[in-house]
Amino acid sequence: MNRKATALDVAKLAGVSRSAVSLVLNGRGDGNVAKESQDRIREAAAALNYTPNTIAVSLRNRRSRIIGIVSDQVVTSPFDGNIIAGADAVARTQGFVTVVMDTELDEARDEGAVATLLDRQVDGLMYVTVGLRPLHVPPNMLSVPSVLANCFDDRPDAGVPAVIPDEVRGGREAAKHLLELGHRDIAFLAGDNLTPAAPRRIQGHRGAFEAAGLPVPSGRILQVGWDIDAGFHGAMKLLDGVAADRPTAIVCANDRLAIGVVLAANRLGLSIPQDLSVMGYDDEFRIASTMVPALTTMALPLREMGEAAMTGLLQELAAEPQRNDGTPGEDVKPAWRQPIETLVPGRLVVRESTGPVPAGRG
């Protein structure tokens, strides 16, 4: 039987020290090992099929190499589970595993879920939500490095870092896309105020008009809800009348609203995008790309948020606390307690439901 490769074998093949191999393969290479050497170490490890002994690494570092993730409903959601997928992918590249607990939208279970994970000696914690919302962070999350994904602390002084979508930018880019197609009479079915996403997207929508030096059409921003029937009834109010009074484009706060708008347009005999351009938001799996016509939409950066949140958390775990004089110690508030908000941009996905403004309506 062939002998299992060791870290020393990797070091010899890569032409580096054994300590350099340990730093790189344990996720601490940046700032300690040159980029070229890091690349050689990873190539050598792959060639030798070498992986660190995770139990030995854990004992040396006094770490479990486990990250606990609490979600409100993400585990049972076919949509925002991409956040956890992105986080888990990053964790695995650094030799960590994730353990997930879902509270099924019961906030009374938050602190207990965190306590259960802490009992398992997790090194860090992440809280993930379905839909952007403020979160009353469980106090026991502050006992280890923690991060929020798709939510933010409703008590900013608690200082838990948050990674959230840039909703203002998303609303702005959606409206800008239609403005660049020549549309001026653009309506916005903007969800409701139960989530902070709606007002932020409205802010971005208005910002696109302001940047273009154009007035926002009066009465064209309606907060109707988030479901298909809300999109249908909202669109009927906008479209069922004299052709010259109809908007030439409708932006929807999610893809389900856009389905309702398409149904209303079909009811009224309007062609998309020849008579009406329709734009969604989210790029929901098995909806946006399979609609007829396929839906132009703003893709939420779900996987990217998970990746960014986990990357930041692991960086904090790798960093040592510093004293005020800059030497290692424990008398300075850890970096992971500092208030940080990271905005992750979405992506415009242009498909077939948007087109140039109808003749005579520009």
Image: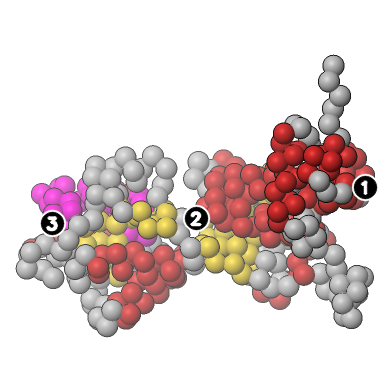
- Discs 3/2, front: 2
Task: Give the image location of residue 85, x and y in percent.
Answer: 59, 44
The CA span between labels 2 and 1 is: 36 Å
Q: Nearer the viewer, residue 105 or 209?
A: 209
Q: Which residues are magenta?
A: 252-276
Q: Secondary structure at mark 3?
A: loop
User: Which amino acid, by three-letter code, is at mark 1?
Assistant: Arg
Query: Is residue 57 rendered to the left or right of residue 36?
Result: right
Find the distance from the CA under tag 1 to the CA under tag 3. Answer: 67 Å
Ranked by sequence position, the earlier of labels 2 and 1 is 1
Q: Under tag 1, what secondary structure?
A: helix
Of residue 194 and residue 169, the one placed in the foreground of this image is 169
Q: Position of residue 290 (x, y in %)?
A: 32, 40
Per the image, the residue denoted by label 2 is: 301
| Residue occupying image coordinates x 19% and y 68% | 182
Q: Nearer the viewer, residue 48 or 152?
A: 48
Question: What residue does disc 3 label?
Answer: 275
Earlier-in-chain disc, 3 versus 2: 3
Residue 134 placement: quadrant: bottom right
Quadrant of the rendered image containing residue 280: bottom left
Residue drawn at x 50%, y 41% as measured from the top left = 78
Residue linked to disc 1:
60
Amino acid at pointer 2: Pro
